[in-house]
Image (cartoon, helix red, strand yellow):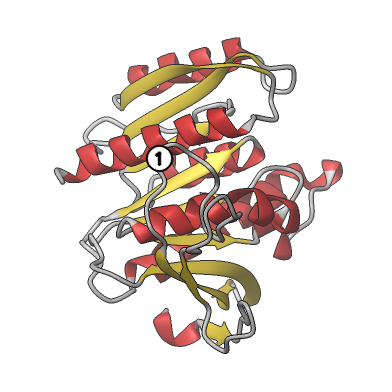
Amino acid sequence: MRAAMIALLVSVAGSASPTFAASPQEGAVQVGRPGCADDVAVRATRELIHFDSRGRPVRGYLYTPRGEANGLGIVMLHGGTGFEMNSILFDAHAIQLASRGYRVLLPAYFDVAQPERTRRTLTARAWRQVALDAVEALQAEPGMARGGVTLWGYSRGAAVALLAATGEDSPVTSAVLVAGGGELEEDLAGRQAAFLLLHARRDEAVPVRTTRRLAEDLRGAGAWVEIEELAFDGHQYDLPTWCSVFGRTRAFVSARSGN
C-alpha cells in the first residue's frame, strides 16, 4: 500500500520540506501548537498524500514524527463538515500527536462518496472501506508495531470508525469515538476490541443517550469500553475541550499498547 501513496509537495513558510519548528518568539502563534497547556516542542512533518480505496484516489494528510517514532498510529476521521474544514480544526492537534511519536493519517473519505440520503447504506460501506484502507496504509509505514493503528472519529467520523472497527473482517482492535452514536451490528466476543467513547454533558446534534446506549451495546457484544463525559455543553467543542479529548486519546492509545 505504501507504493500507492503519492506524496505531494507541501510548502511551509517558504520551505520545500513540510517540516514544522517551534517559533522562538515569545507570545507568537506557533505552528503546530493548538494552545493546550501540555503542548510539546514541534518535531513533525505533514504531507498531502493520495492512497487508493477500491480504485479511487483519496486525499489525506500524513503526519510523521521527526524524532523517535513509538510504533503507533492513529487514523483520524473527520466530521460532517468535511475534510477541508476539519483538517484545519485538527491540524495542530495531529502535529502534536506526531511530535510525540505517533504517525497520524487524516483521510478525506468524502472523496469516494458525498453524503446522500438516498444512498446511505452504499455510502456508509464506501466510507468504511476508506477507513480500513487508511489503516492499511498507515500500518505499512516504517517501524509501525503490528496492530498498532487506532481508529479515531468525531461526529460522523465516529460512526464511520464504529463501522470499520466492528466489521467481521476488521483488523482494528481499538477505536476512539468522539460525539458519536450508532448501531452495533456485529458480535465482538473474542476480538479483544477496546473503545473509548467521549461525549459532552449535553449535545444538540448527537444526544448523550445514544452514546451511552452504544457503550452498553459494545459491552454486551464483548468489547472493553470506557466512556467519559467532557466538561462542555454542545457539539462544536471549544479549545480546552479539544485539549482534553486529545489528552484522553493519548492516554487510551498508550495504555492499549502497553507504552
The residue drawn where x is 50% and y is 38% is 162
108 left or right of 61? right
- Tell me which corner region of the image, top left, top right, bottom left or bottom right, holds residue 253: top left
28 left or right of 236? left
What is the count of numbered marks? 1
- Tell me which corner region of the image, top left, top right, bottom left or bottom right, holds residue 222: top left
75 left or right of 208? left
Amino acid bearing label 1: Ala
Q: Residue placed farthest to the front in the image?
A: 26
The residue drawn where x is 51% and y is 13% is 213
Residue under pointer 1? 175
Q: Is residue 207 visible?
A: yes
Q: Position of residue 146 (x, y in %)?
A: 21, 61
Q: Position of residue 12 (x, y in %)?
A: 61, 77
Asked whether 21 or 108 is in front, the reply is 21
The residue drawn where x is 38% and y is 45% is 168
Asked whether 36 or 47 is in front, the reply is 36
Q: Residue placed farthest to the left in the image?
A: 258
The image quadrant where one finds the N terminus is: bottom left
Q: Position of residue 241 (x, y in %)?
A: 55, 28
Secondary structure under tag 1 reads strand
Q: Is residue 129 visible?
A: no
Judge whether 115 appears above or below 202 on screen: below
